[in-house]
Amino acid sequence: MRALVTGGAGFIGSHVVDALLARRDEVHVVDNLATGSRENVAAGAQLHEVDIRDDALVALAERLRPEQVFHLAAQADVSTSVARPDFDADVNVVGTVRVLEAARAAGASVVFTSTGGALYGECERPATEDDPKHPLSPYGTSKLAGEEYLQTWNRLHGMANVVCRLANVYGPRQSASLEGGVVSIFLDRLRDAETATIFGDGLQTRDFVYVGDVVSALLAAAGSGGGVFNVGTGVQTSVAELFRLCAEAAGVEAEPALAPARAGDIRDSVLDPSRAERELGWRPARTLAQGLAETWAWVTR
């Protein structure tokens, strides 16, 4: 298969690229390198330094004629979306429309990485795909808008685009300074013997899913012919417990500092992944402890 991966020089995208190359697909990466890194792109993939908001994206897709597009390029930080909602919407809404038009021009379908936690809002139980959407940040709203554009293109143009709503993804190559992933932040602080900070009381919960498991879900979704799927573990872990597990993986004893909760952060978030298991045959393969051990090995490589 010939695949195009937007954001393929970033955290999750580069792992998608690796998986596609491992099965001998032809892989093209679209990334403006604003947050991605050339070093993340495997030698077997071709990097095209293009912004997804540029007209050049459609021309590139018409020339390459990919069969499948994995759309991971995004403004993915909640705090940035609160501070700069116009920028967030430009990248996540306008950029997604450009990607859809590029895929349509090439005759390809799109697997779109959306968000679970920022989309559903507060979760008293694992959220299903049909639950109401109550985003509490511009980031969640922009991802919801992107989803609606995908569904409109499916109806209007007969496309088979797929939405994958991701839980809190962690793993190797995640940057503590870019995506703001709490796992990468905690592990970096523990490696450097610095104090980690928890925003809030630490009892807020999240659904942490390993990046390798996420990649498996995205590849499975690519052959589904359409749909919306949660990609998570269904397991709630408090941030305080996460820190304890990170310290355990690092083999150290440490205590975090507490700071006021941040605007736009939700209290509890967990996804029900049963539809993905039922329809895609996908389920997460790693426990949180296993994933943290693999991530710690990468952080201290």
Image: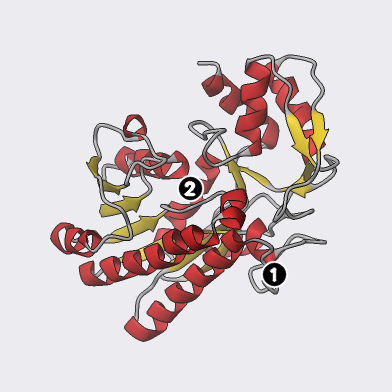
Q: Give the image location of residue 287, x and y in percent.
A: 67, 37
Q: Amino acid at mark 2?
A: Ser
Which residue: 47% across, 58% down? 87
Quarter holding residue 93: bottom left
Q: Which residue is mark 2?
A: 216
Which of discs 2 and 1 lies nearer the camera? The answer is 1
Disc number for residue 157: none
Left-right relation of 4 to 114? left
Residue 100 in sight here:
yes
Which residue: 69% across, 18% down? 194
State the CA–CA distance, disc 2 to disc 1.
Answer: 28 Å
Q: Please, which colouring scheme is shown?
A: secondary structure
Q: Give the image location of residue 116, x and y in percent.
A: 63, 59
Q: Amino acid at mark 1?
A: His
Quarter holding residue 254: top right
Q: Which residue is mark 1?
A: 134
Numbered disc 1: secondary structure: loop
Numbered disc 2: secondary structure: helix
